[in-house]
Image (tube, helix red, strand yellow):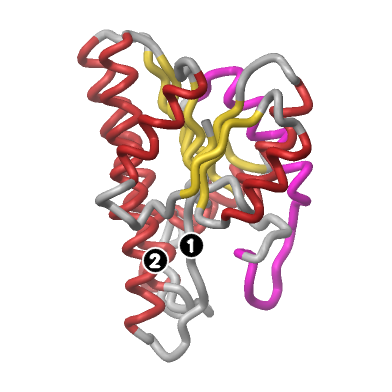
Amino acid sequence: MIVGATSGIGEGLARRYAEEGQVKVGIMGRRAGRLKGLCRLRPEVFEAEVCDVTDLERVEASLERLAARMGGLDLLILSAGTGDLNPLLDYGVERAALETNVLGWTCVADWAVRRFERQGRGHLAAITSAGGLRGSGAAPAYSATKAFQMNYLEGLRQRLQGKNLPVCVTDLRPGFVDTAMAKGEGLFWVASVEEACRHIMRGIARRKDVVYVTRRWRLVAWFYRRIPGWLFKRMQG
């Protein structure tokens, strides 16, 4: 199941998994037209459910319906997310990121882990961001919500280890990917959606805890985290 399958990496992953043609692929997103378009490509593979993860009163029921139509669930990829540059510090921009990347995201992640705990197996893979490693003056809510996601996934991983269950939690951390989410000047090492999807699928198949997309971003992460605070606050956000 791919939640957030109607744009960017989520849609790219849906297409790639459908090409393999070995399993049912459940797709969820808020754009009904995009879901219908995917289903027309491979009607024998896709099962679709229209739902926005911020609709907290509907999202769990929508996930249950989709899983039932799929006949079960082995892997949930949580790709839903949003974020924007916010030079004016407009609260409306920040609120949108909080509602999607924290409230809706957590609702889906918790539902998946509870289900996998009940069935005694499963795999949650969530797309966070290398942008969550430090704060960002240009997009404060985006970087903060991605840091939240990283820490939440680590907590879920610790929870499952304590229960001694074969349930995997993978934190997928893209750098810059050529999607609508990639904004700003001076972008470097920009991966295509196709390249990002290849790296993500490989990391999921290997059941890794943390995957940087692409692998060179591990070097950026190592360096970024070691910048002292006094210097980091003087850097351009």
Residue 192: within the magenta?
yes
Q: How many marks?
A: 2
**Dot 1 alpha-carbon crowd within 10 angstroms: few under 14, some 14 to 19, many 20 or more:** some
| Distance of label 2 from label 1 (alpha carbons) | 6 Å
Residue labelled with disc 1 = 82
* Left or right position of 150 against 12: left
**Rendering coords of residue 101 (x, y %):** 38, 56
Q: Residue furthest bottom?
A: 88
Q: Which SS class for mark 1?
A: loop
- Which residue is depicted at the point 30% across and 45% down? 106
> Would you place residue 74 above or below residue 136 in this image?
above
**Rendering coords of residue 174 (x, y %):** 59, 48
* Left or right position of 34 against 170: right
Q: Quadrant of residue 218?
A: top right
Foreground pick, 15 / 203: 15
Q: Quadrant of residue 215?
A: top right
- Which residue is depicted at the point 70% across and 14% down? 22
Q: Quadrant of residue 31?
A: bottom right
Residue labelled with disc 2 = 97
Identify residue type, mark 1: Thr
Contact flag, marks 2 and 1 (Cβ < 8 Å): yes
- Which residue is depicted at the point 38% across and 70% down? 96
Residue 7: within the magenta?
no
**Rendering coords of residue 112 (x, y %):** 35, 29
Report the magenta residues as a range.
181-208
Foreground pick, 36 / 6: 36
* Left or right position of 237 against 54: right
Residue 92 is labelled as none
**Dot 2 alpha-carbon crowd within 10 angstroms: few under 14, some 14 to 19, many 20 or more:** many
**Rendering coords of residue 55 (x, y %):** 33, 56
Identify residue type, mark 2: Ala
Q: Which SS class for mark 2?
A: helix
